[in-house]
Image: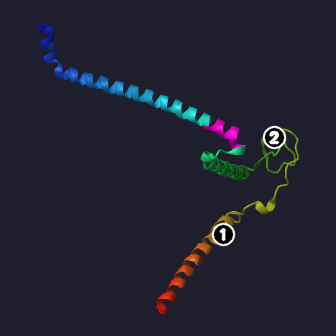
Amino acid sequence: MDFFNKVSNTISSKGKDVTKRAKEIAEIAKLTGQIAEKEETVKGAYIELGKYVYESQKEDAPEEVAEKFAAIDAAVEEIEQLKREVRKLKGKQECPDCGKEVSYSAAFCSYCGAKLPEPQPEEVVDEGEVTEVTEEPAEAAESAEPVEAAAQQAESVEEPKTEEI
Ligand SMILES: [Zn+2]
């Protein structure tokens, strides 16, 4: 490195540090972006792979993944239920034959002509009155009771013992 360069380096060293740092930061951002992009690719491939495994083996789930399969089945079922609720609120229903969204009050599918189930007026929830939702908490309460009862029994079993001793 010649004299001129040395001098100019010294003079602008601070400025160069800042420029260097800025370049590094830009480079880091660029690389981080590339990493995120590749990670998305991997994630996407994993999802595709998982879907493939699920689709091809759901009838006979391997033991190691049976739990995950069951979780997917349960979530898919819940999603369907939630979609039905949304559709109902929008005054729509899904054609049982072609799966298209059609009017809730229609007697026949406007796409495939299939007969649609009769609208069920008892399922219509009055404003401010929640009839259906009460079902689930009631079940939950029932299932919680035996646990409490068992706990109480356990306590009451211990009590007489201490009295005897
Ligand atoms: Zn249809």
Quick one: 137 or 163, which is closer to the camera? 163
Residue 110 is situated, as x and y percent measured from the top left of the image, at 84, 41
Q: Residue at x 47, y 88 (%)?
A: 162
Tell me the crowding category of disc 2: few under 14, some 14 to 19, or many 20 or more residues within 10 angstroms, Cα based.
few
For the residues marked 1 and 2, what is the alpha-carbon distance in whole angstroms? 35 Å
Q: Is residue 55 magenta?
A: yes
Side of 20 where 76 appears, left or right:
right
Identify whether 52 is placed above or below 114.
above
The label shown at residue 98 is 2
Q: Is residue 62 magenta?
A: no
Query: Quarter of the image containing the N terminus?
Result: top left
Q: Residue at x 82, y 51 (%)?
A: 105
Q: Earlier in the sequence, mark 1 or mark 2?
A: 2
Q: Amino acid at mark 1?
A: Ala
- Identify the residue at the far front of this view: 165
Quick one: 90 or 142, which is closer to the camera? 142
Quarter containing ligand 1?
Answer: top right
Residue 118 quadrant: bottom right
Identify whether 108 is placed above or below 163.
above
Residue 89 is situated, as x and y percent measured from the top left of the image, at 71, 53
- Identify the residue at the far bottom of this view: 164
Range shown magenta: 50-58
Q: Which residue is mark 1?
A: 138
Ligand 1 contact, mark 2 (Cβ < 8 Å): yes
Identify whether 5 is placed above or below 122.
above
Residue 100 is situated, as x and y percent measured from the top left of the image, at 78, 41
Total number of numbered discs in the rendering: 2
Q: Amino acid at mark 2?
A: Cys
Q: Main structural element of the magenta stretch: helix, strand or loop? A: helix
